[in-house]
Image (cartoon, rainbow, N blue to C red):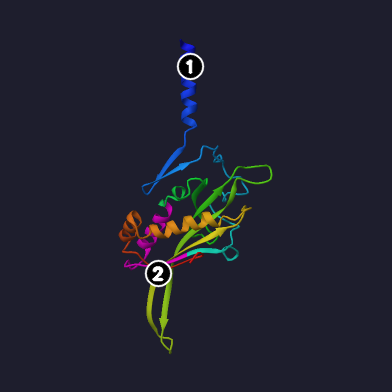
Amino acid sequence: MMKNQYILLISSLFGTLGAPFQHSYNGIHHDLPTTRPLPVTAMSSSDSPGDDGSLSEFDVSKEETLLRVNFSFDDDEGSSALAAVERYTKSFPFAAVLPVQPLTYLPVKLPDGNPALRVSFLRKKTAEKGSVDGGILFSSCLVSEEDCDEDGVLENYKKRIQLTAWRISKGQTVSKSFSEKQILLAFVKGLSEGRGAEVLTEGGNVQVDSVFHLWM
């Protein structure tokens, strides 16, 4: 009797593991195929940021700009507005946009010290290839705009926030254009919807002034 119960228990477990996994995002259900998922492995030392979370070898001038968003705000100093943009970026559900693409995202620092968020696409690690298959780097900063008259007298001065997303080509062996597009279009859309719009408003009535991305 105990042996039969044990067999039934094992059969039940394998039946559960073999069932399609359902993921819900914005009310839409996605049925994922019952294939073996890629393991989420730790980054190798050559793929990961430094011990202090910095990207010492990352050169933005050599990477393609995928997205640039300019924001205006009511906050005089801009610190609260910048924090709101960074909070939206860090809380964005990147994994939910592409449930079949294994990825990680973690805060890092650019070589100039500015905080950033690194989204890394993952793959199965082999002897020839590491576990990271490129990614996207997001960073926001305060920039100033100065308008002067013909005599060089300052007529207008204001601050704005600029958010930029660059492609991380290191480790990328095949194009990730589809994944990049889906993530960035969803990221931009979320700025004006639900929680995204609420976070920006709370940060000093932050407004999107302009958007540029690679797929416009």
Q: Is residue 207 left or right of residue 3?
A: left
Q: State the residue at coordinates (43%, 40%).
A: 22
User: From the viewer's perspective, is residue 170 above or below residue 17?
Assistant: below
The label number, if any, that marks residue 56 in the structure image: none
Identity of the amino acid at label 1?
Tyr
Label 1 secondary element: helix
User: From the viewer's perspective, is residue 212 above or below residue 148?
Assistant: above
Q: Where in the figure is residue 53, as x and y percent of width and height? A: 53, 51
Q: Is residue 32 magenta?
A: no
Identity of the amino acid at label 2?
Arg
Q: Is residue 70 magenta?
A: yes
User: From the viewer's perspective, is residue 31 above or below residue 184?
Assistant: above
Q: Is residue 27 left or right of residue 167?
A: left
Q: Residues within 10 Å of mark 1 (few under 14, many from 20)?
A: few
Q: State the residue at coordinates (49%, 18%).
A: 7
Q: State the residue at coordinates (46%, 29%).
A: 16
**Magenta segment, which residues?**
68-90
Q: Which residue is mark 2?
A: 160
Q: Where in the figure is residue 144, as x and y percent of width and height? A: 42, 72
Task: Examine the rendering and report whether any part of residue 83 can be seen.
Answer: no
> Among all residues in the image, which is located at the extreme top?
1
Q: Nearer the viewer, mark 1 or mark 2?
A: 1
Q: Which residue is mark 1?
A: 6
> Between 178 and 71, which is closer to the camera in this rendering?
178
> Between 81 and 39, which is closer to the camera in this rendering?
39
